[in-house]
Image: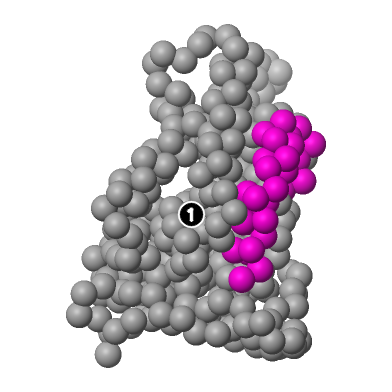
Amino acid sequence: MAAPMELFCWAGGWGLPSVDLDSLAVLVRTYARFTGAPLKVHKITNPWRSPTGTLPALRTSHGEVISVPHKIITHLRKEKYNADYDLSARQGADTLAFMSLLEEKLLPVLIHTFWVDSKNYVEVTRKWYAEAMPFPLNFFLPGRMQRQHLERLQLLCGEHRPEDEEELEKELYQEALECLTLLAQRLGSQKFFFGDAPASLDAFVFSYLALLLQAKLPSGKLQAHLRGLPNLCAYCTHILSLYFPWDGGKARRSRPLAPRTVGRGPGMSPLPTFLPCPSAEVPPPRQTPAGPETEEEPYGRRNQILSVLAGLAAMVGYALLSGIVSIQRAAPSRTPDTRALGMAEEDEEE
C-alpha cells in the first residue's frame, strides 16, 4: 500500500487556513474538498522542517518531493484529482484567462501590500512571522522572505515599469481595482464562478481575495475597495465557512452536510463534496488533537535545540566573516636571554 501524500505549508492566522499566498492556493485547490485529494497536511511555522526547506512542499506517495506550487497542482491533476473535469471548453478557456489576469494585475499589488508597504510589513506581515517562527529563525527569515518577494515583484512588473515608485504604485493599484470590479461582475449572484460546484478558478480567486479580506491592514486601499464589493466578500466567507470551519482558531457553527458527487475523471468513481442541508443547526463535532491537519512532533525538543544551535553557529559565523567580531592573537612574551644576563653579571663583577 502506497504511503499517503503529505503537504507541508505555512500555518494559519487571521482566520485563514494559511497566511501564505502560495500555501493557501495549494491548500484550497487540493485539501479543501475541491478535488478530494487524500492528503496529510502539516501546517508548520518552520520551513526548515519541510523536505525542501521551503513552503509549500508536497511529498508524493512515491517519495518524490515537489516544492513549486504550479508543479504540485500539475502532479495532482496527473493523479486524477482535478475539479475541472465537468467544465466545458469555453469555461476552461475562461479559467485560464482569469488566472492570467489575476497573476498579472492582482498578484503584484498583493506582494506590494504585504511585503513592500512599510506600515503593513512592520505591523502585520513581519510581526506575524516573527511571532510564529521559532528562535532564532524569527530574527533573519522574515527579512530574507521580504527580499525574495521584492525580487518576485520586479519580475512581475518587468522592464517597462515606471522608475518612480509613486507612479508605479498608482499604476499597480489602478489595475488591481479594475481587476476586482471585473471579478465581481463575472461572479454576479452565483455561489461559484461556474455555478453551484467549485472549480480550480474558485480556489485561485479565493486564495487571492481571502488574504486581502481577512488581514487587519493599517494601510489598506485595495482592501477597502474589496469590502465595497459585497458579492466577493460573501463568496470568500461562504468558502471559508464551508471548507475551513475550524481554521484560524475560531469554531464556527455549521449545518449538517449533504453529499453531492463531483467527478474525478474518466473511468473513476465520483468523490463526495458537501453542501449545507436546510435542516436545523447542530453544534460542530469536537476537533480531535490527532487529525489530518495536526503536526506530530515526536522530536520537538530535539528539533528546537538543533535550531538554536544552528542559529547561534550562523550568527557567530556571520559576525566573524563580516568583521563585527575579530580574534587577535597576542604575541608571546619573550623571556630574557640567559647569555645577555650572564654578560651583565660579569660586567658588574669587574
Image point 47% across, 15% down: which residue?
Answer: 161
Q: Residue furthest left?
A: 267
- Name which quarter of the figure residue 335 lies in: top right
Q: Residue 340's image quarter?
A: top right
Q: Quadrant of the C terminus?
A: top right
Residue occupying image coordinates x 64% and y 38%: 114
Reading the image, the residue beneath label 1 is 193
**Vertical arrangement, residue 286 with respect to residue 92, above or below:** below
Q: Can you see residue 130?
A: no
Q: Is residue 225 left or right of residue 80?
A: right
**Residue 57 percent coordinates (x, y):** 41, 60
Q: Quadrant of residue 36?
A: bottom left
Q: Find the residue positioned furthest to the front.
A: 189
Q: Position of residue 5 (x, y in %)?
A: 37, 75
- The picture places residue 23, in percent across and down from the top left corner, at 50, 56
Quarter in which the N terminus is drawn: bottom left
Q: Is residue 15 above or below residue 62?
A: above
**Residue 215 visible to an observer of this rendering:** yes
Residue beneath the point at 29% across and 84% down: 269
Q: Which SS does the magenta portion mostly show? A: helix
Image: magenta residue range? 215-242
Q: Is residue 195 above or below residue 144?
A: below
In the rendered image, residue 140, in percent from the top left (x then y), is placed at 61, 42
Label 1 is placed on what type of residue? Phe
Its colouring scheme is one colour
